Amino acid sequence: MRLIMNCIGCGSKNIDALGTLGKLPNCNRFELSQQEALDLPKYELDLVKCSTCNLVQVGTHLPVIEVFSDNYPYFSSYSKSWLDHCKLAAKSYKEMFNIGMGSSILEIGSNDGYFLKYFNECSVVLGVEPTKGPAEVAIKDGVKTKIDFFNDDVAVEIIKDEGQFDLILSNNMLAHTPDLMSVLSGVRRALNDAGKFIVEVQYAADMFLGGKFDTVYHEHFCYYTLNSAISVFEKNGLYISDAEHLITHGGSIRLYASKQKIAKTDRLKNLIEKEFEQFSIGNVYTEFFIKAEASKNNFLKYINDNGPIVCYGAPTKGNVFLNYCGVTYKDIKFTSDMSPLKHNRYCPGSGIPIYSVDKIIYDKYSDILILPWNIKTEIIKQFNEYKIGTKKFITTIPELLVV
């Protein structure tokens, strides 16, 4: 554990405290023993903001080797809606930037290779992924993958073997590194002069304004607004010229950057203006923590009136929510998840058992809490196909809803 002293985006020491969600365990660590899951050490989950570049970040860092261990349980390809999103994105990038047979593609944080498969006609396709499980799946499926944390030193190694790249991709990775300046330096080094760097990352404006506090966790080292992203990128020699606002992961932004200064599109200018207006009303950060407390109280009342209940999913965000609320296996009997690396293990902090997805285990329960609320439509459709009777589906973010 390490307390932040310098901004990870620009190096400034001008750090201001915003608030805390209290002490939580590493919410992506799944133990084989219920008691070990209950006894996991807890660390402050606090947010701070750099007053130089405006980047919001966690104030307490866990070692990356603990957060992204060999047992890292997240596989991107388990969500159909996410795969559909990425297929459309790949098609769009090919058309926009003339990506084809002679092109070279690098993805940082390539997970199980799900995205790079859409570029298999390109001459060079390479993923960099630090977690062994997903990376080995990618390699087995024929996606060339370097198992490592991407940074400037790794970029030097890659260029020696592959040269520079026409397109560098980063899907939901750029918040997952405390070594942000070295990562961006590596991107600049690995990108050719005409190349594009395309980033998708959760949008801090949606998180803060929508009260989506469960997306704050130790694995997410920072949280980007357009304002802070532009500032951090420019500090590190990259320039954002366009952006899109997306609905994925409860609200994301797609950033288009390059090594060259290019005039900002009208779309980007409009998004920046809207963001400025949103953050000019009230104290967004204070209200964020007030909303978190209200969400907790509403859920605890529901549990008190209707519990015990069961869950679907064991995402990191869900474990943040459960730990913040202080519920355990006594309140929630079990959950199930698509990832085999989570099966027959226990949720961190709460000790809730995790099973493989099977309609039989849900037969006698009427109330099902959906922890990955951002894909609730996909999950409810899945349960409807099971035809196991009427169920009440509960989501808690941004507010308690029973469907």
Image (cartoon, grey):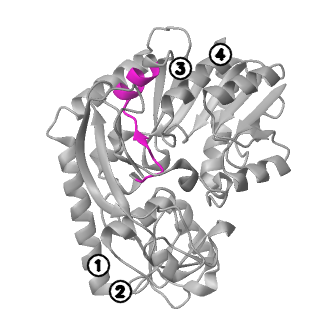
Amino acid type, label 3: Ala
Q: Which mark is residue 307?
A: 2
Residue corresponding to mark 3: 257
**Magenta-tinted stretch:** 217-233
Foreground residue, 39 or 386?
39
Residue 146, quarter of picture: top right
Residue corresponding to mark 1: 302
Q: Could you tell whether 350 is left or right of 186 in the image? A: left
N-terminal of the two: label 4 or label 3?
Answer: 4
Q: Which mark is residue 195?
A: 4
Name the residue: 62% across, 61% down: 73
Foreground residue, 242 or 184?
184
Q: Decide: is 381 above or below 398.
A: below
Residue 36, given in percent of the width and then of the height, sits at 51, 77
Amino acid type, label 1: Tyr
Task: Confirm whether the magenta stretch covers residue 219.
Answer: yes
Asked if disc 2 and disc 4 are in contact, CB closer than 8 Å, the reply is: no
